[in-house]
Image (cartoon, grey):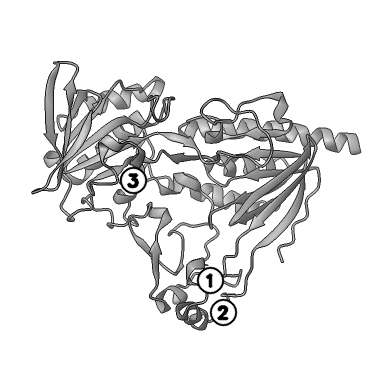
Amino acid sequence: MTEVIATNETILVVGGGISGMTAALEAAETGKQVILVEKRAYVGGRVSQLYKYFPKLCHPTCGLEINQRRAKQNPNLRIITMAEVSDVNGEAGDYSVKVKISPRYVNDNCTACGDCGRAVESEFDDEYNYGLSKHKGAFLPHKNAYPYQYAIDPAMIGTDDATKAKEACKVDAIDLDMAEENIELKAGAIIWATGWRPYDAAKIQPYGYDRYDNVITSVEFERLMDQAGPTGGKLIRPSDGKEAKNVAFIQCAGSRDRNHLTHCSRICCMASLKQSTYVDEQFGDDADVSIYYIDIRAIDRFEDFYKKVQANDNVKFIKSKVASITLDKASQNPILNGVDTEGYHRYANQHDLVVLAVGMEPSVAEFPITLTTNSNGFIEADDSNGAIFGAGCSTDALDVNRAVQSATASALRAVQVVNKVAKAEG
């Protein structure tokens, strides 16, 4: 049974990505009691799935490890993974929150030795790698996971493999009888930091994401480059394992489109500029990159990075909204069809691999309490939300830097609320 002590002076953070972790840590480091709930088996969110940040091209592991260390050292912060908020009632300063905790089937005895994973044969789609690879039925979510603890895929429960995993564990960490729990918490303020999800590329029918193996998304491309990813960091295409030296990036794939997402997702241009350097990193002078764009959003401090990519002779910029993608069956090369608006000539260009810069939409479409949202589903700052404050990409399409700023601001607002509660009750 999960025991959680919380009062109306507690701050609840929903979502453990970069925004949720930032908000929770900032609030906890002011001395407030904070509970963070995260639906995945680990915290870190989509940032943990990136290969590099823009514009410095540094690896996210550094920032994540700092946050993990801060979390471990702070007694005011309690993290509950595999947990989702199912109901919220009350008002500012006095909320009652119901939380559903899914079974991990692994307890705190786990040392992450890996014996359970080696003992089983069952494999399942790896959500961390966006389904580009499989993980064992007993698995560590990723190499830098926090908590650093194995989990059992629920689909394996009741099978012989589940028994093998339990028998292989020398520290009695596997509990196949774990069941779903439902707990109720009190909170004075809530920070909603449930982040974003990539737009479903299969909905963009002319681009053939669900038909052509060598058309992938920008988030999948990040995982291909990671040495701990599905290809060991080798930039090869899914259909045949051929090196993908000739890569096309399509901007605004599903964004700024009345048939899909009407808003600009802001990060997509910079993400593709960054990813163009990945191809260069792997293949040097043999790299051949084409960026198909409507316009490039690279403002403020990102302008210099944009100019640097523009100066690369291996990168071409084609001002065009790609009309469709077809397939050369012999080579399995995607063929991009459209009109270059800077010359008004038609093209049918073949590439080894096509990367769709898919837009960002809120991860949560329906909330357990009424919140004011805009036409794109992002949480608005509104007095009617009481002491429930959106943070990071639950409020807008933001890059990491701006998401962290948003989270810090939300933490300060939540601290002000519980300070008032403490003063009123004191």
Q: Earlier in the sequence, mark 2 or mark 3?
A: 2
Please tell me whether mark 3 or mark 1 is closer to you in this view.
Answer: 3
User: Pointer 2 and pointer 1: residues touching (CB < 8 Å)?
Assistant: yes
- Residue position for label 2: 171
Residue 174: percent from left, percent from top: 56, 75
Residue located 68% across and 34% down the image: 370
- Residue position for label 1: 111
Residue 195: percent from left, percent from top: 53, 40
Looking at the image, residue 161 lies above or below residue 43: below
Q: Which corner quadrant of the image does residue 143 belong to?
A: bottom left
Counting other residues with Cα less than 10 Å from the Cα at mark 2, is it few (<14), some (14-19), or many (20 or more)? Answer: few
- Check disc 3 and give the amino acid type: Glu
SS for dot 3:
helix
- Residue position for label 3: 222
Task: Using residue 116 as the reference point, say whether residue 56 is left or right of it.
Answer: left
Counting other residues with Cα less than 10 Å from the Cα at mark 1, is it few (<14), some (14-19), or many (20 or more)? Answer: some
